[in-house]
Amino acid sequence: MSVIYGLDLFGVAVFAVSGALAAGRKRLDLFGVVVLALATALGGGTIRDVILGALPVFWVSDPTYVVLAVVAALATFAAARCCRLPSGILPVADAFGLAIFTVIGARKALDPGLPGAIAVVMGVMTGVVGGMIRDVLTGEIPLILRREIYATASLAGAISLVALARWLPGWPGNSVVAVALVLVIRLAALKWNLALPMFLPRETRDGDAG
Amino acid sequence: MSVIYGLDLFGVAVFAVSGALAAGRKRLDLFGVVVLALATALGGGTIRDVILGALPVFWVSDPTYVVLAVVAALATFAAARCCRLPSGILPVADAFGLAIFTVIGARKALDPGLPGAIAVVMGVMTGVVGGMIRDVLTGEIPLILRREIYATASLAGAISLVALARWLPGWPGNSVVAVALVLVIRLAALKWNLALPMFLPRETRDGDAG
Amino acid sequence: MSVIYGLDLFGVAVFAVSGALAAGRKRLDLFGVVVLALATALGGGTIRDVILGALPVFWVSDPTYVVLAVVAALATFAAARCCRLPSGILPVADAFGLAIFTVIGARKALDPGLPGAIAVVMGVMTGVVGGMIRDVLTGEIPLILRREIYATASLAGAISLVALARWLPGWPGNSVVAVALVLVIRLAALKWNLALPMFLPRETRDGDAG
């Protein structure tokens, strides 16, 4: 429980950083940065809790999440004004958030005994929704829609967690293995530009998407 | 009940196909296609259930919906890679989804005795939200915002269902008539480019929308 | 209670007008205008009620909200076709909606005794989400992301309400002061183009935002 809680807080912090960095690229002001960081950090878990009916959602009953996300956003704001941040930090922070939230989302469905297919969907949804909100609000094409392995990494992690939970129920390493799997796949995809087979319907070749 | 369930599954399948086709036009990879198909197929009903407080939402308690949407997305992916799909298939699939989800959404509010105005809103919302999510995520201007009869078709169907439910309560043809009405209006609008009077506020003529 | 209800209806009406005006700039048809007005007027409060678990949401149990928003949208549509509307009306309507919804959202969290930090988040969220939905659906960059004092005005109002509720519990002027504060800050920012310090991370200077 405590490991999960710590991971959850870490995921909230890195997604808050990624939201604040994305806000910075769009030259938002201070509180716009905070709002975008909150939406990125809390969006996925909020939708997960709403769909499962676990209301009020997690951050209403435990303000630690809100305070942490605000502090992470302000720290990012301050750091970006004083120092030169490494240029590749946004996709890496995003990868950590994706990995952690995928696993926590899947566990939230597995723990009350929901079917494995639902746990996989909840895991991917929790993982990708925060970043989607961030991208839609800043007018970027969502990462998930680019030809990169993104939803795929989350899917692999969610499936592996469901399988491990069936074969090794109660083993505390389950979550760690699944988080690591998402991270390895996503970071490898970023480093070597890996991609899956693309959907290329013939009728779009002549550009009728208009 | 069983006719409604079958219609609902059919609506999920056609919206999943429409989400997968839209994903293909943006050249997503395999699992991006699946995620977009799921969001399109399950988005409208999810928001309907959340607003009505029918939690957890429908697809959490019945994994058939998730499995069906994934299979429809994969089949669309495979078909698009092997064969030349007819070019007008996306708007037609979308019209079927719109018609079915409008009626199912309105019924979900009528059945527990909510007022007719609420049933109309729930019907239109269930019908249009899935396609809106698809369009926003793929960076298209939502269909509903183009100068076509789209929300209007859904509205006509929802109002007709509410009226029929009042005048002919219990008649099993209610839903069929309302589904057919949405379909006819939407397909006629597509075929003959019908449009409603446009909102044309004078102050925008000199382009101050910036 | 009755003052709050009146304010809430007024906020719904002005956000419906702002949604209808935004729809008009995009040349939607009649019912697209109504749908966008409903999404703008009811979006913020819907998300607030969902997150707090106050289901079904407020407008399902009281159809007055839906009817009022539809009437406001139709009146805006008619007015825009017959007369020349003053050009600055959209940001001012938006400022009134922001102020009222911020205060109502924060009160909905304070009344059941939730912590002040949560009340601030719920206030800002209720205030900004309707306008965000409007902007995302019409393909505009959300107001909140522009370099203007927008989220900041909402934040100031929410914090002032939480402070007043602690120091002067039960004083009926609490809400009025907080509404006025948001309005004054937002209208002043509009009039004199006020802005907060901008987030300007160094690494974006060479344009790596892709």
Image: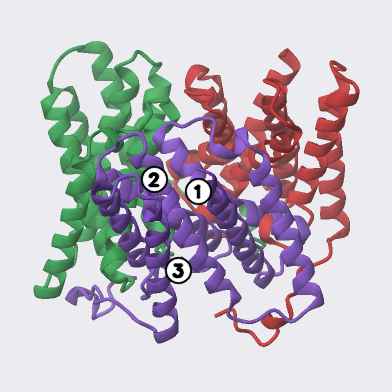
Chain colours: A purple, B green, C red
Name the amino acid type tagged 1.
Ile
* Circle 1 crowding by C-alpha within 10 Å: few under 14, some 14–19, many from 20: some
Q: Do the residues bearing badges 2 and 1 touch, measured as CB atoms within 8 Å?
A: yes
- Name the mark on residue A143: 3
Q: CA distance from mark 2 to mark 1?
A: 10 Å
Of the residues under marks 2 and 1, which one precedes in the sequence? 1
Q: Position of residue B155 (x, y in %)?
A: 35, 34
Mark yes or no: residue B188 visible.
no
Name the amino acid type tagged 3.
Leu
Q: Is residue B169 above or below residue B50?
A: above
- In this rendered view, identify the residue nearer to me: B75 or B165: B75
* Circle 3 crowding by C-alpha within 10 Å: few under 14, some 14–19, many from 20: many
Callout 2 and callout 1 share a chain: yes
Q: Position of residue B69 (x, y in %)?
A: 21, 50
Q: Position of residue A75 (x, y in %)?
A: 75, 63
In the rendered image, which quarter contains the N terminus of chain B? top left
- Chain identity of mark 1: A
- Name the mark on residue A107: 2
Can you tell which quarter of the image residue A161 is in? bottom left
